[in-house]
Amino acid sequence: MPEDRRVAVLGVGMHPWGKWGRNFVEYGLAAARDALADAGLSWGDIGFVSGADTIRNGYPGFVAGATFAQALGWTGCRVASSYAACASGATAINAARAQILAGLCDVALVVGADTTPKGFFAPVGGDRKDDPDWLRFHLLGATNPTYFALYARRRMELHGATEEDFAAVKVKNARHGLANPYARYRKEVTAEEVLASPMVADPLRLLEICATSDGGAALVLSSMDFARRHGAGDGLVSVAAVSTVTPRFPQTVIEMPNFATDSAVAVADVGGPGFKRSIALAAYEEAGVGPEDVDVAEVYDLSSALELDWYEDIGLCKEGEAEKLLRDGDTALGGRVPVNASGGLSSFGEAIPAQAIAQVCELTWQLRGQAEGRQVERARVGVTANQGLFGHGSSVVLTR
Amino acid sequence: MPPTKSRVPAVDGWFRPEPPALLGSRCTSCGTYAFPREAMFCRNPSCAGTEFEEVPLSTRGRIWSYTDACYQPPAPYVAADPYQPFCIAAVELDAEKMVVMGQMATGVTVGDLGVGTEVELVVDTLYEDDDHEYLVWKWQPVHGGGDA
């Protein structure tokens, strides 16, 4: 038997997503308190606090771990702060897991929260002519949806995806999000409404591109021993794997915020798994499960079209078969393997450092059977997938 | 009479205006290309190369994918007033085995483009102020086909 490297998810908590315009610390604090209450623990029980950073809220956001610890009241516990763009949450989870598995603490608190500006994400201020994230806006006018649209168009050409397929993803996720009390948008939309919404970056329309949101999410993680001593029973959800891998050279798919891919002249691109696929593969390998075991998945639908790419990248189907999976209803609630039962980013909007943590909150509720109004029946294995700018992979496997 | 604004690159050292070409780098040890130019390290994990030569990249390629910008991008993009939507393409270069992004030349719409469309590099205006016209590289469909 390989060594048991699971850690227990004792508690989860979220602050509703929205455009509240308040201090991000408030959302993180609310989520943290909910997670502690859910775990039946108090703040004084926490040995390590792991913050996922926000870069749009000044210095307190860069040192989020300490910021949340101060808000909860200094206790002298261990602390760390992680930034990995959209993968910040998973990186913070992984930091907590490592502390627990190393025996450095029994119980850890992971918190991420964000307050976001309206509209397109812009680079942080100042003239930074050596930062590709600044330069792509200046020289190309390439926003985040530009890159999402490049993938969407490529999918249409290679795999025959249609605008109707992309709209169907939005319709599905909007329906999933209806019953989720933490979702920002809880309104059903029709395919006609999606296809009538303004074009943002051809072929993607306004209702197909995820908004930017305020929100907060938190987890209380512990060693399996602590969880058992704490009285955890059969329903205990555990983190079976966290994948935070980089791409492999040559990375031949254009990635935000780059101007070009790697060159495959010296080292051939042998057609192995691309970066996005390698993220979940690493998680499955670590967890000792495969995509055929997955009952429910939360993937990063920054655009409706991108959700289809993730179906293939997390192994729910072969390359080119995502449209069939969608059209057959396999990824809708009630289908073979529901994807984004929470409503996904489509219903939440993105609160960057909180989002990967929120994915784990949702899967925990799903695996416990507590996802009221959006429950996937008899879910025992869940996977999250996400990717941070500049090459941070993020995937978490949860089991019950 | 054409205006007498001076024409300057919007970024130094990334392209040459005449004849138009992107300026990349090539690792002298393993041959890996990079754009923009790499001076510190070779991205190939099996290569410890520290010397890089500046090389003009292929000026023709085929579209890997494309889109447009229907809404005005935020600063530091400098938009014309009124805003003029534009197309962006990711273009595959055969010799370098890499994909390079660029705006499409002024006036090109998504209807003019397809995955696989052959394009060539041009130098075009990115934005202007009272004294200068700032230049950048763009892609433009090759009409009539055939390699130059």
Image (cartoon, coloured by chain):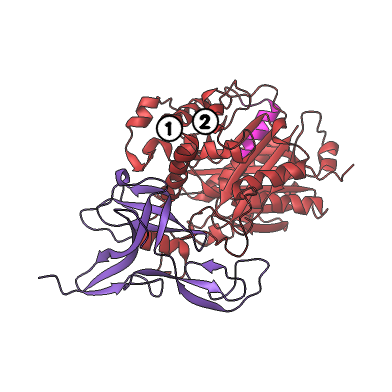
Chain colours: A red, B purple
| Numbered disc total | 2
Secondary structure found at label 2: helix
Q: Residue at x 38, y 53 (%)?
A: B118
Of callouts 1 and 2, which one flags the residue occurring earlier in the amino acid sequence?
1
Answer few, some or many: residues within 10 Å of disc 2's Cα (few below 14, many 20 plus, some between 14 and 19): many
Q: Quadrant of residue A39?
A: top right
Horizontal and vertical percent position of residue A64: 59, 56
Disc 1 marks a residue whose amino acid type is Thr
Q: Is residue A34 visible?
A: no
Horizontal and vertical percent position of residue B37: 49, 71
Q: Circle 1 is placed at which residue position?
A: A162
Residue A193 is a magenta residue = no
Q: Circle 2 is placed at which residue position?
A: A323
Which image quadrant: the N terminus of chain A? Answer: top right
Residue A360 is a magenta residue = yes
Q: Is residue A386 left or right of residue A220?
A: left
Residue extent of the magenta highlight: A359-371
Secondary structure found at label 1: loop
Whether the residues at callouts 1 and 2 have beta carbons within 8 Å, the answer is yes
Horizontal and vertical percent position of residue A207: 39, 35
Q: Is residue A123 visible?
A: yes
Q: Which mark is residue A53?
A: none
Q: Chain of mark 1?
A: A
